[in-house]
Image: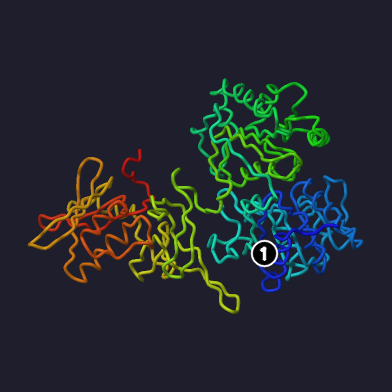
Amino acid sequence: MFILRPYQQQAVDAVIHHFRRRGEPAVLVLPTGAGKSLVIAELARKAKGRVLVLAHVKELVAQNHGKYQALGLQEGLQADLFSAGLGQKENLRRVVFGSIQSVARNLPRFSEPVSLVIIDECHRVGEEEDSQYHQLIGHLKSHNPALKILGLTATPYRLGLGYIYNYHYRGMVRTTEPRFFADCIFELPLRQMIKQGYLTPPRLIDAPAVHYDFSRLLPRENGLFSDADIERELKRQTRVTPHIVRQIIEYAQDRQGVMIFAATVEHAREVTGLLPDGTAALITGETPLPERDRLIDAFKARTLKFLVNVAVLTTGFDAPHVDLIVVLRPTESLSLYQQIIGRGLRLAEQKQECLILDYAGNAYDLFAPEIGEPKPAADTVPVQVLCPACGFANQFWGRLGTNGEVIEHFGRQCHGFFEDEGGHREFCDYRFRAKICGHCGAANDIAARRCHSCDALLHDADDQLKAALALKDAKVIRCAGMSLQASRKQGREQLLVIYHDEDGAELSERFSFDSAGSLQRLNQQLIARHWRAPGLQPQLQTLASVLEAEPLLRHPDFVIARKQGHIWRITEKIFDYQGRFRTAYAL
């Protein structure tokens, strides 16, 4: 008899609660090894009406179907299989488990109303309306407009897209861009699963003695590295692979099962050839399915110790005894990296940990993948920043001081949202960094071209720079730094701010402290605009406090000034520049 773990029951309850209140597609986020199949089985058992459970590979279809059948033995429940890869295409019973490819190619056979669609590995559902998922869902909705759609995944993001949903149940906005899935209604952190003893702890060897250097690789438009580029880099480092394989063999001596993720087919063949005879198998996309199944069965039976593969065993593969994962391929996809590591985190007898050997320099943090924006610098970490408008605790990339205080962050907009009693939701509109509309004063994203409020064309930084460079009475410096100095003018205490360019040219501005108006100007034009952690800036009142805060101020990328008499007066400071002109030190 199957009994749901507490978090599995919480996930099921969250789905029921959500669909009683709302009809939008929703997501459950459960780490690899959390028992998604059992959650799916329980939801399919409890749902009213017909249920269609989809996956993209036959292994997942069979795994989910098997768990439902086992659970259904208690109540005499059975489900159909609709998958060409499994040799069955039946859909007469209330619950059907199918592959998306087989179902999408047989839409006329799915014309009876379906009440719930469950999509495993739902991060594979793209935004393209002509995809198989969208075609199928459109067909099903034509027979039941009230169709409910649930996705499950361990990695709720896609390379080049970011998060696959808009709202998180803890009150945050992941993205304001249109998404197929509206809500994440339950999420179980990987760290919690390990702490509670449901998954094996990973132990990452950060710097193996030898490793590949893939620093020259540049991702293509789709965000992925090309096989040709990877192969070229590997050929430059032909002597590295034998050293790496020797080290893998040493680490594997007291390990039960080893999975090796190679970069290309040619690379995988080389690695397999260097492993001890009779201990290793190679699986690629070219491996015939019967041969692939035979090799996987041999590995699971432990007659083979090493399983080398190229991008084919990242999902739908379950071998709990795996306790050594070797990564020999670079990837720009956090989702793929997590799927790879997840192959070794399932529990098994005599398995205390899973060793992770990364020879490709993939610097991902398995326990903190929640940041939606790319990491801006190697020394940045997740930091918490409260929104001054709504109080939401945002998580951004940033830097911490010696006492743990946030001294810099790279957040643009608050991720919080409001929901009224009727269920209507509205984003918090506070922006930590903004481009102000000159027509209506609205704050816009720093990359916006038009105002979101009045649709006016916003000032373009490149246009501003081009226009200033064409004027004889204008001066533009490519700012490389700024310095603050105490000054006095006509007996009054002042602050002198000097902006420096790469070649020694300077522009400066002064701030006074002798009136409420001058203090307001200081805090609005200097402190608020230059503070490295916007939204957390204090209201400074004295020259001493400003000079003390100098390390917490950032310099602009460009400074524009116009000549008035014999004085250059600063008219514009450009921050967060993303245009075509070179910034300081950027070659």
Q: Position of residue 349 (x, y in %)?
A: 76, 41
Secondary-structure class at tag 1:
loop
Image-based side of 355 in relation to 162, left or right: right
Q: Indicate the amino acid at tag 1.
A: Pro
In depth, the one of 173 and 187 nearer the eye is 187
Tell me the quarter of the image containing the N terminus. bottom right
In depth, the one of 61 and 255 nearer the eye is 255
Image-based side of 333 in relation to 395, left or right: right
Q: Is residue 11 above or below residue 498?
A: below
Q: Position of residue 581 (x, y in %)?
A: 34, 46
Total numbered circles: 1
Q: Is residue 453 above or below residue 59?
A: below
Q: Is residue 562 above or below residue 365?
A: below
Which residue shows up at 60% across the image and 60% down it? 165
In depth, the one of 417 and 131 nearer the eye is 417
Tell me the quarter of the image containing the C terminus. top left
Q: Which residue is mark 1?
A: 25
Which residue shows up at 88% across the image and 49% down it? 88
Q: Position of residue 323 (x, y in %)?
A: 69, 37
